[in-house]
Each structure stands twice: as structure tokens, then as C-alpha cells.
Image (spheres, grey):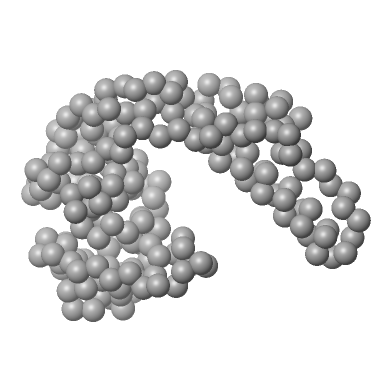
Amino acid sequence: TITAFEKWLKDGTRGRNYICVVLKRLQRFFSWAITDQKRKNLEVTIKNPFTDFIITPEIYGTPIVMQKKERDLLFDFQFESDRLKKVRDIFIFQCYCGARVSDLMKLTTNNLHGDTLRYVPTKTSKENLKTVEIPLNKKALEILKRYKDPEGYLLPRMTDVEINRTLKTVFETAELDRLVEHLNPKTETIEFVPLHKVATTHLARRTFAGLM
């Protein structure tokens, strides 16, 4: 049944990594169900179908990082659309602090201590409550001065889907079209594509780390 499910997932629209994530979630569900029966001192009636099933591992290409001149060009680019300006500012600020977009959208003035940003990353908060402290440079602080949210949020509120959709337009408008190596998740082959085609919030995190 699991093999048939995997075959159904491979319909040509999903990549290996997505399929791997789905199967791992299902695998964790069966593990939880068996553990739950044991915890309740019940007879274990569930057989884990993943005992004899090997999940094909995820595959990743070389991380794509923006060049410093590209990041600076985007910071200075004059957009006519307010929406493009806001998404650009969110992206550039992320390039300077490295936060996940889910954390970025929750940051308020309470997280700002002088020129330092302090917050606990949500994704790892269950295992590690360590506060991250990031000194902000002049350009990052300049971006924050552009927004005065009545509820105290540091940046305009948007979903990651909204940001990622608009980012490609932001990059294309700024003519950020350098060809980069990109692993096609569906064909699992290396392709050369314009930078604006792979513009996402993850690119900002990689750029933060890469330029550091």
C-alpha cells in the first residue's frame, strides 16, 4: 500500500523532496500510534508498514547565494509599486538578520533593543529556548524606520506565500537575471536559470549566511 501511495505521489508534478517529506510524516504517524498503544498498556495491534520500506532520501543542489552587489542593487532600486517596495524591504531585512520569514512576521518593537534584534526562533523553541541576538547595520535600521505599525510590528505583515509570489516580480523588475545553477526537483537535473526564477525567502537566509 505504501509503495502504491508513493507511486501515486510520483505524478510528475511533485519532486523527490516533497514526496520524502510526505512519507516521513506518515512514518511518524505510525510510530506515534504504536507508541501510544504501548503507553496505554494496550495490545499493539498496529504493524508499522515502514519496517521493510526504504524512503528515498532527499536531494539538494548547491545553495544559491546573492552577490553583495546584487543585494545592494536591490536595496537601492526605485520601485513604483508600494507592494514591491514592501516585499523588497522584507527580503533585504531578512538578508541582514537571517531570520526565518515565520519569525520575521512576528517581530515587534519589543524585540528591538537599541541596534540589536533579539528573539527566540520558533522552529527550535521546543528543544532550545536560547535567544538569538543579531546586531543590525545601518541599512537594516533604515528599513525599520520606514514602517510604524500601530500594533508594533517591525515590518509589513504578509504570508510567506504572498512574499514568495511577489519576490519573483521584485527580482525581475530589478533585472536580477544572473544565470545560476539550480537543481530541478522534478527531473533531478542541474539547470541554469535566471536568479529571479529562484527568488524566495530561503534565498535571503542563504545570502545572510553566505555573505557573512
Look at 29% across and 44% down and name the residue there.
203
The front one of 120 and 139 is 120
The image position of residue 158, as x and y in percent, is 36, 55
The front one of 60 and 174 is 60
- The answer to whether residue 5 is seen in the rendering is yes
User: What count of labels does the image hold?
Assistant: 0
Q: Is residue 12 left or right of residue 191?
A: right
Look at 31% across and 34% down and name the residue there.
62
The image position of residue 43, as x and y in percent, is 91, 56
The front one of 95 and 147 is 95
Q: Quadrant of the N terminus?
A: top right
Work out whether 163 lies above or below 57.
below
Look at 65% across and 24% down and name the residue there.
7
The image position of residue 131, as x and y in percent, is 36, 73
- The answer to whether residue 146 is seen in the rendering is no
The front one of 157 and 128 is 128
Q: Quadrant of the C terminus?
A: bottom left
The image quadrant that residue 198 belongs to is top left
The image position of residue 97, as x and y in percent, is 25, 60
Look at 77% across and 53% down and name the residue there.
33
